[in-house]
Amino acid sequence: MIEIDALLAPMDDGEIHLEQLAEQHREGLRAACAADHEIWQIYPANMSGAGFDPAFDAIRANADRRPFALNVDGVVIGMSGYLNFALDRQAVEIGGTYIAPATRGTGINGRIKRLLLDRAFECGIRRVEFRVDERNARSQAAVLKLGAVKEGVLRAERITWTGHVRDTAVFSILAEEWASRA
């Protein structure tokens, strides 16, 4: 049986600290999200400007989405977490990731994803999925670098806040695949 409390407990990797997104992270995340207004064009929701508060509140109210605030040296640099729980199938998705531009390309995203993957598999998850907008080449490359397998594309899978009809690439990593990388 998968212990949800264990899955969602805080995580650390040196100067990186992950904890469940809470009201106390609102302003730090707002500042991080404001650092890249253009990126929100390829996200399902807009977390910049006037779109931030409604999106933040919706994320926190969604029981099937459990994001972590990403802190580096005490500063909120973004968010990522678990969503679309299918615990009866021992599966979960990692997503909803945003990392401030100043930390991109530093290896921090990979370290964060490894923390999330390690925790998921330690807690009994056997399949972790990633769903990425087909337009987001950077995120697709990052997921492949982790060892995920691209399983296909869900055509016209959702409509984003801009009205764009999004094709979504689906990737996965299985527990035994992750264990063999160690």
Image (cartoon, rainbow, N blue to C red):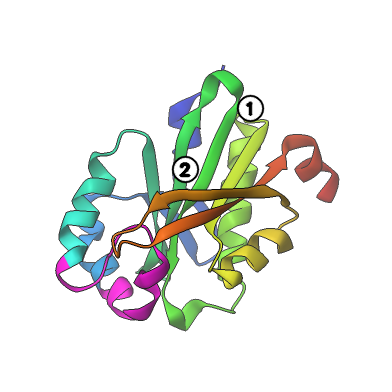
Query: Eyeballing the image, is 121 above or below 43?
Result: above
The image quarter containing residue 45 is bottom left
Badge 1 marks a residue whose secondary structure is loop
At horizontal 60% and vertical 22% (from top left) the residue drawn is 89
Q: Is residue 119 visible?
A: yes
Mark 1 vs 2, N-terminal side: 2
Foreground residue among 173 and 110: 173
Badge 2 marks a residue whose secondary structure is strand
| Residue neighbourhood size for the residue with mark 2, other residues' Cα within 10 Å, grouped as few (<14), some (14–19), many (≥20) | many
Q: Position of residue 78 (x, y in %)?
A: 39, 65
At horizontal 23% and vertical 56% (from top left) the residue drawn is 55
Foreground residue among 150 and 99: 150
**Residue on which the image places disc 1:** 124
Query: Eyeballing the image, is 92 above or below 18?
Result: above
**Residue on which the image places disc 2:** 82
The image quarter containing residue 136 is bottom right
